[in-house]
Image (cartoon, rainbow, N blue to C red):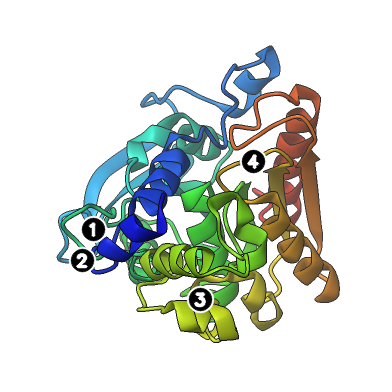
């Protein structure tokens, strides 16, 4: 993109470079390998009434997208249940809770109450942002717990998870909002979710360089994501980071150091791999019980490291059993 064109588009919220980023992010395949190996069947189940009860499109707010699906296990006689909220991928602009129905069915089949939550997607005609989406998730969780309780399933702890955009929102909830959750958040897991927005890590989008063009691109990109107006001058003096703080999950780990299982591809051209290293450092510095899986041959889809992917999924199951055992 030329400098001239960027300046012309300054009043428009989504420039060409930002649109490319969003479309690329939305194209990513996460939490499921692009080509499914045989072992992946262990972590995916087709829904049937033999597993439990599915309640669809329950409202949690006034927005058109403010709905969730609740998966209730067949065994309804236990004193308490763990809840797993799984948030869908789609680059913050696409996707739906039903995209993860096989994952949610698998979780329910293991004895968990599971929930998929929709959130308002960014379009060319609205101002939805990662910040507004995270606030919708924060508003939704108490309604999910309330609906489970009303159905006779007492929730005493929860895990929040997701892929890509959903993983970003899951980490924000766990680390920023978890202390205010209606039940303790005991685990978060997912893949390739952005957790840090330091400009120099985002060079794959032309951000973080000492040029006017780079600072303008960064201001546009980060403004879209944060829902805050960020200027090139703020990119230059570093004050933009204060406006990104609310959606930078890595910066909130110390507030609520929830155990984590995460996965990132070293060749990711959508969620910069360098940004994931800041998350890893934050987990380490705050003595979090975590597993961090590096996919050395993969990009955003984690498609080229089947053996590592199996280890990652095994770790997810291990941590679920450790922090949310089904009695």
Residue at x-position 28% and y-position 53%: 121
Cβ–Cβ under 8 Å for marks 2 and 1: yes
Instruction: Please determine whether, in this image, residue 214 is positioned above or below residue 161.
Output: below
Q: Circle 2 sits on which residue? A: 61
Cβ–Cβ under 8 Å for marks 4 and 3: no
Secondary element at tag 3 = helix
- Along the line of sight, which residue is nearer the eye, 120 or 196? 196
- Which of pointers 1 and 4 lies earlier in the amino acid sequence? 1
Callout 2 environment at 10 Å: few (<14), some (14 to 19), or many (20+)?
few
- Which of pointers 2 and 1 lies earlier in the amino acid sequence? 2
Cβ–Cβ under 8 Å for marks 2 and 3: no
Callout 4 environment at 10 Å: few (<14), some (14 to 19), or many (20+)?
many
Looking at the image, residue 317 sits to the left or right of residue 33; the answer is right
- Which of pointers 1 and 3 lies earlier in the amino acid sequence? 1
Determine the CA span between mark 2 and mark 1: 5 Å
Q: Circle 4 sits on which residue? A: 268
Secondary element at tag 1 = loop
- Along the line of sight, which residue is nearer the eye, 116 or 36? 36
The picture places residue 67, in percent across and down from the top left corner, at 25, 53
Looking at the image, residue 17 sits to the left or right of residue 241; the answer is left
Residue 66 tag number:
1
Q: Circle 3 sits on which residue? A: 244
The picture places residue 286, in percent across and down from the top left corner, at 80, 76
């Amino acid at each position: 993109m030329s400098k001239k064109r960027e300046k012309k588009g300054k009043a428009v919220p989504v420039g060409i470079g930002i649109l490319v980023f969003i479309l690329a992010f939305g194209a990513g395949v996460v939490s499921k390998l692009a080509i499914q190996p045989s072992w992946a069947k262990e972590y995916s189940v087709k829904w049937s009434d033999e597993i439990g009860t599915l309640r669809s499109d329950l409202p949690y707010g006034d927005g058109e997208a403010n709905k969730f699906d609740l998966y209730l296990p067949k065994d309804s006689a236990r004193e308490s249940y763990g809840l797993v909220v799984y948030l869908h991928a789609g680059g913050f602009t696409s996707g739906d809770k039903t995209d993860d129905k096989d994952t949610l069915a698998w979780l329910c089949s293991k004895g968990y109450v599971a929930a998929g939550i929709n959130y308002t997607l960014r379009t060319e005609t609205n101002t939805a942002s990662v910040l507004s989406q995270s606030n919708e998730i924060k508003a939704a969780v108490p309604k999910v717990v309330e609906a489970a309780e009303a159905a006779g399933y007492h929730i005493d702890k929860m895990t929040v998870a997701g892929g890509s955009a959903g993983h970003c929102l899951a980490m924000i909830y766990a680390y920023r909002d978890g202390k205010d959750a209606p039940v303790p958040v005991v685990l978060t897991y997912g893949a390739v979710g952005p957790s840090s927005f330091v400009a120099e890590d985002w060079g794959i989008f032309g951000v973080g360089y000492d040029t006017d063009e780079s600072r303008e691109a960064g201001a546009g990109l980060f403004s879209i994501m944060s829902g805050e107006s960020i200027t090139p001058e703020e990119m230059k003096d570093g004050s933009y980071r204060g406006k990104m703080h609310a959606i930078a999950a890595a910066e909130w780990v110390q507030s609520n150091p929830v155990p984590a299982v995460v996965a990132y591809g070293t060749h990711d051209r959508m969620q910069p791999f360098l940004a994931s290293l800041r998350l890893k450092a934050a987990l380490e510095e705050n003595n979090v019980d975590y597993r961090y899986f590096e996919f050395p041959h993969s990009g955003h889809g984690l498609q080229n490291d089947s053996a590592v992917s199996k280890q990652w999924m095994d770790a997810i199951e291990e941590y679920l059993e450790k922090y949310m055992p089904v009695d």
